[in-house]
Amino acid sequence: MSQTHCAVQGCKTSIYNKQIGVYFFPCPVSHEMRDKWLHALRNKCAVLDWTKSRICSKHFENKYFDSQRKLKDIAIPTLFPIGHKGPKYDNKDKIDKGLNKLTQAELVNDIKNNLLKLKEPINFDKMVSEDLKCRIDAPIGVQQWLLIKKQNHLNARLLELVAQNRRHVDILKKNMEESRSSKKNTGHNIETYKYIVKCLQEKLVNLEEQIEILTAVESR
Ligand SMILES: [Zn+2]
């Protein structure tokens, strides 16, 4: 993070090159305003440090300045370099844009609520074979329901892997603390670490594969 350059990605303003009338502003202090800034700056900053990052005045609409060009307490950065893409997502169309605006928690809640509203198609069981193929005359709703079920299943597996990783990290931490307090059994401890690290690496590969599958399904 930098105190000399604007934190917004794609913005070139720094204390060395800023034009007359462009100012730098620190981040807000209150939790309420920080939440709003986080929402507004998601995908817009590579790093955002509440105490060190600075945002230049180019990102604030006129309504957020008082008559002395001082930034009002309620100001939120809303103006960003045109064509600049977030680190990970494209703003291709309105649906992508809408999705980008949601936080992860909002997205999860939205999916959960909408899934609850959906109903399993009539005769879903009979329309799908044991090897998970839809009958040729199955309506599109059956195919989509099957896809949703597969994605749910994949999500559940991913969550289980994440939980397993967390458990392994906990074991790793505990072992490290133990070996710090007693210098004995170092050889045994190193073997344990090696094993756990190997497990973690395998799970990571597994997670990456599954995320790839989910991404491929979404992009169709
Ligand atoms: Zn800027």
Image (spheres, helix red, strand yellow):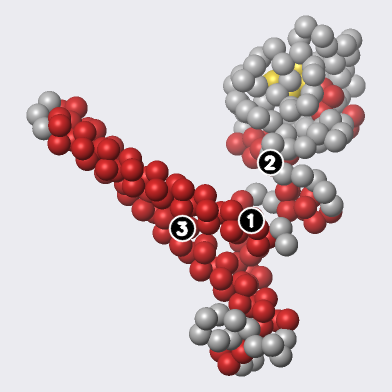
Q: Which mark is residue 215?
A: 1
Image position, residue 1 (x, y; %): 62, 20
Asked where in the image residue 116 lies, by quadrant, the reply is bottom right
Q: Nearer the viewer, residue 125 or 49?
A: 125
Q: Is residue 12 above or below residue 160?
A: above
User: Circle 1 — which element?
Assistant: helix
Q: Residue at x 62, y 28 (%)?
A: 47
Chain-order first, disc 2 or disc 1: 2
How far apart are the two marked residues, 2 and 1, measured between alpha carbons? 13 Å
- The CA distance from mark 1 to mark 3 is 16 Å
Residue 159, numbered label: 3
Badge 2 marks a residue whose secondary structure is: loop
Amino acid carrying label 2: it is Lys
Instruction: Specify the quadrant that holds the C terminus.
Output: bottom right
The percent coordinates of residue 40 (x first, y second) are 73, 39
* Residue at position x 80%, y 46% in the image: 91
